[in-house]
Amino acid sequence: MALAPTLTSADRAPSERVITGEGLVEVRVNEQPATLRIDPAAPAMPLINRSVAESAHLKMKSSWGVGIGYAIGNTSVMSRTQVVRLDLGNGRIKRRVGWTSRPFAAVADGSIGPEAFPETIIRFQLRDPRVGAKTVSFPMDRDSTALGIFGNFSATFGQINVGGEPMRVRFDPYHARSLVTAGAGARLARSYDGAITGQTEPTEIFFGVQRPVRTLILNRPLELGRLMISSLGIRTTDDGSINSIKEVGVPEQHVDPDEIVVTAKGKKRDTRRDTLSLGNDYLARCSSITFDRGEKVIRLTC
């Protein structure tokens, strides 16, 4: 009788891919070579430039296929998609890729998120570890890791709790400034005594789309491990409203206690799209971002 082999701890160890520098990886799309940037803020579905799609002889004009739209404020960027022979360095597999008229980021031949890779652990080594660093874990947002029939078209988010409700956290080291959507900013302002200041500035989000952004000051910082989030940009008109947030230097209006104020309950706002994006202004203080699919957590070491 044959005996089953005994698994050692090394056999059971999860596979890991370590990403350093610019995160560039050589891939092949239908045997066509391309260079993609592995971006923790990018969708799991590889987004390739139109020129690569043409070189790989994808179906550029056919009505067949699945179209995916990405909304950035009031701008929608549509992608065409197709299942191709894709090699990410681990051998050829069938995988759906997308391409758009606007590149997700103006770098290399496209972008790809960490969830696209077969390794259990994807670690972005931003810089050398620092003495006294602390690691904080964020549960992965379930909506961003759910694989549908056509694959995962979303980025992979972490999750925090703000005001008793979950809020998505995106890790975006390739953008200089940390941002929140309007609704997320309003919730942070209520929980951490926030106020808005500064002029509106157009700021690039993704796909080259710029959105109006002001500055949100948190008088009680949001603590994420060793990161103390006290100032960040707020997208003034995206996914919610900033009307409830006070302005820096503007006195609050006090209600006469003898005055009767009548308010009406409206439909509760959907908070699932409320997002905090951590940019390089804070992530520059961190040494690594680790996506652990096995444990379903994202670890940030700062």
Image (cartoon, grey):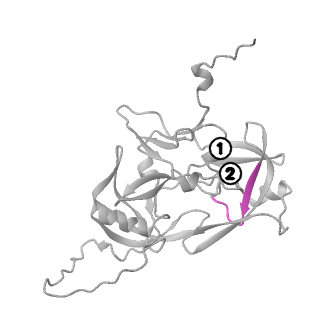
Residue beneath disc 2:
108
Residue 194 visible to an observer of this rendering: yes
Question: Which secondary structure class fits the magenta region best?
Answer: strand
Amino acid carrying label 2: it is: Ala
Is residue 100 on the magenta stretch? yes
Can residue 177 be seen by looking at this rendering?
no
Q: Residue 182: which quarter of the image?
A: bottom left
Residue placed at 73% from the left, 38% from the top?
A: 89
**Residue in the picture at 64% in, 16% down:** 6
Magenta highlight on residue 47: no
Question: Which one is nearer the viewer's eye here, 276 or 209?
Answer: 276
Query: Quick check: marks 2 and 1 in contact, CB under 8 Å?
Result: yes
Residue 262 position, x and y percent, is: 27, 86
- Near mark 2 (Cα within 10 A), the count class, few <14, some 14-19 or many ≥20, is some
Q: Position of residue 27 (x, y in %)?
A: 74, 44
- Which kind of residue does numbered mark 1 sit on? Leu
- In depth, the one of 171 and 118 nearer the eye is 118
- The residue pinned by badge 1 equals 24
Residue nearer the viewer, 204 or 230: 230
The x and y percentages for residue 125 are 52, 38
Task: Characterize the local packing of mark 1: few (<14), some (14-19) or many (20 or more) Cα atoms within 10 angstroms.
Answer: some
Q: Which residues are magenta?
A: 95-104
Horizontal side of residue 15 vs 99, given as left or right: left
Q: Report whether 261 appears left or right of 20.
A: left
Q: CA–CA distance between discs 2 and 1?
A: 8 Å
Whether residue 130 is situated above or below residue 280 in the rendered picture: above
SS under mark 2:
loop
